[in-house]
Image: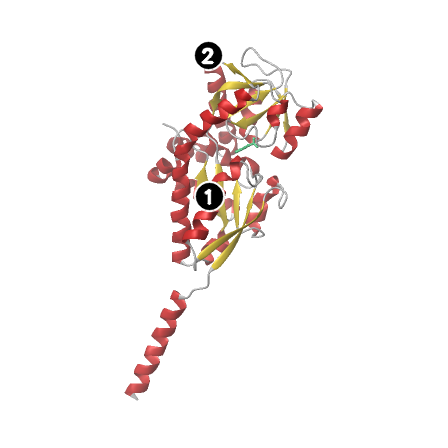
Amino acid sequence: MKINTLLSAAVLAGASIGSSVMAEEVTLRGVSAFNLGTTFSREFNSFVEWVNENGKGLVQIQIVGGPEAVPPFELGNAVQSGVVDIANNTSAFYPNLVPTGDAIHLAENTVQEQRANGCYDVIDRIHQEQMNVKYLAHAGDGMGFHLYLTKPIDGPDLTGLTIRTTPVYQAMFSALGANLVRTAPGEVYSALERGAIDGYGWPSQGVLDLGWDEQTKYRVDPSFYNVDVNLLVNLDVWNGLSDAQRAKLEEGAAWMESLNANNAEINLVEYAKQADAGIETITFEGADAEKWLNTARDAGWAAVEAVDAPLAKELRACLTK
Ligand code: 173
């Protein structure tokens, strides 16, 4: 009797230890909103390499593709529904799902600071509640956005210009008088070539990736905002992982976020490449620079406030200095 009880206890203990030690390795299917091999898939790719190296036997990621696999403006829905397990995406491509996501690019602090002051938790919570995703990691800190043009301007007045936009630039450029056309990155080259647009909003990095330098004459400085490119994990998938699998992904996320510190240096390399490609710089100074940056900030926050004033207030308090 005693022996039997001991034996079965041992078997049960063994079985349960065995099952936790030998938990199945999980492979997540990932898609990027940006072409693989280009700037805004860079950190995602590094993250996947890190996980596949450090998560052996636990968790792996298979990159399924880029915008050719899932159109960029549909990727948010795909990770929400679980068609995709993990997405590399910017909040500007899923405003339908997280309408206050625009606040993320208005941040004046880093994701490390946001993790320390609780702002990361607020952004994660709204992603979980509104989009059914875990906001796992954030790339883009230290990189701003610019206006790029095919014709010169002599001040912060965009009246009469037709500019390619996403929600990032919408409030600012329309406050400065531009006509706006919203397109995915994949349509920018042909819109420039056809003369359908006089310019486009884009970060400091990546202009040469898809050959836009051939169609671009000017970059307007200074840059504004802070790029956000985020790793989002379907929440049902996230909740179905073991503690060890989640911890490994979070370790990789922190490692990926540490790469943001490289952006200041990469920006300078990119500006040099743009100059070599013949892109001239139009630099606003004094009152013009002030109007440019104040309009960016004020119109940007007004747009978030119009969506959800209390949440905008909460986010502004922890995203700005
Ligand atoms: O211009 C864009 O397509 C855009 O909004 C964006 C956001 C983050 C990184 C790159 C582009």
Closer to the camera in the image, 239 or 250:
250
Closer to the camera in the image, 257 or 84:
257
Q: Which residue is mark 1?
A: 46
Q: Residue furthest bottom?
A: 1
Is 58 located above or below residue 135 in the figure?
Answer: below
Q: Give the quarter the ligand 1 occupies.
A: top right
What's the residue at 50%, 56% (across, down)?
A: 27
- First-in-chain label (2 vs 1): 1
Is 250 located above or below residue 111 in the figure?
Answer: below
What's the residue at 46%, 43% (across, down)?
A: 46
The answer to whether residue 225 of the structure is visible from this angle is no
The crowd level at tag 1 (other Cα within 10 Å; few <14, some 14-19, many 20+) is some
Judged from the image, the secondary structure of the residue bearing numbered disc 1 is helix
How far from the left and from the top, in percent, is residue 215? 63, 23
Picture quadrant of residue 274: top right
Q: Which mark is residue 231?
A: none
Closer to the camera in the image, 299 or 17:
17
Q: Which residue is mark 2?
A: 285
